[in-house]
Amino acid sequence: MEELKNNPKYNQLIQYLKNLKSVAVAFSGGVDSTFLLAAAREALTDNVIAFTIKSPYIPDWEINEARQITNKLTVKHLVFETEISNLIINNPENRCYLCKNFVFKKLKYEAEKLGINHVVDGTNFDDIKYYRPGIKALMELGIKSPLLENKITKADIRSFSKALKLETWDKPAYACLLTRIPYNTEIKKEELRRIEQAEVFLMKLGFKGVRVRSHNNLARIELNKSQLNDVLKNNLNNKIADKLKEIGFTYVTIDIEGYRTGSMEVREG
């Protein structure tokens, strides 16, 4: 913590948050939103609250981790349960924009009821380098992104989080379960649960940042390239196949290209 007192970028963020007077942090329990929540707690003391959305496409373990983190930070935490919006039930290609629009309208409404000045989210400065359609929805709704506005990168966030002794400082990136399903495919709760169970099983085996992409009855597992060899080296292939078939998949494959973002955007033709 001492090393941050003289860090101009960190101090600029704290002052920025102080100027907002009161905030509701859209909180997932990930690296970015946890750091933002900790910084907001320092800047605003009790004038900060965490808002979390609980939906079928959010794994239960993420909700549980979010609750544990807010307890440690002694921040009031509200969890809002929602169903899958009809706007995204068929997983359209503009799903992220539609979803953010739906979710953040609700969070703004809840913040207004509590007399909170601003809803803030953990979008960081690196996010604008990539295709992030949800950012457009945030801008349209007037959601503030303090990390983005203060040019704080992912590397900054991990470094600051480590200095603050946040357990999430080296947590892998995650995304909602909708990213595991091809575009223009009906979203079914049972498929989401199947994906979640498969990923939890793989994480318990020691695989970090794993994705199980679902193609009807086929599971395509994406692992970090450094861990691809571990499957065969430790004779885990049969164990993984048996478990995923028990969960409900008929075929189980491991993608030799490894984990990468946007793999569901590849067009077949």
Image (cartoon, rainbow, N blue to C red):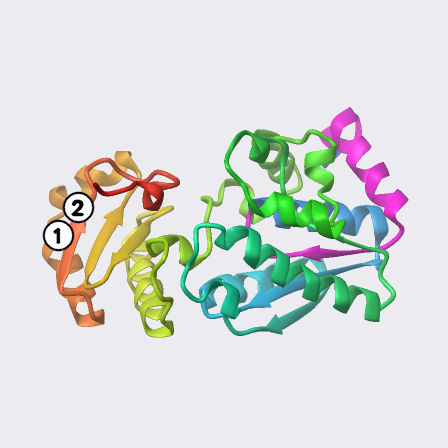
Observer-nearest of 123 and 77: 123
Amino acid on which the number 2 mark rests in the picture: Val
Q: Which residue was labeled with disc 1?
A: 237
Closer to the chain start, of discs 2 and 1, is 2
Q: Which residue was labeled with disc 2?
A: 231
- Residue at the spot 62% in from the left edge and 62% down from the top edge: 103
For the residue labelled by badge 1, is the local secondary structure a helix, a strand or a loop? helix
Q: Is residue 199 left or right of residue 242?
A: right
- What distance separates the C-alpha of mark 2 from that of mark 1? 6 Å
Magenta segment: does it hold 119? Answer: no
Magenta segment: does it hold 26? Answer: yes
Residue 216 percent coordinates (x, y): 23, 62
Which stretch is magenta?
A: 3-30
Residue 265 percent coordinates (x, y): 35, 43
Please give the label number shown on residue 149. none
Observer-nearest of 234 and 134: 134
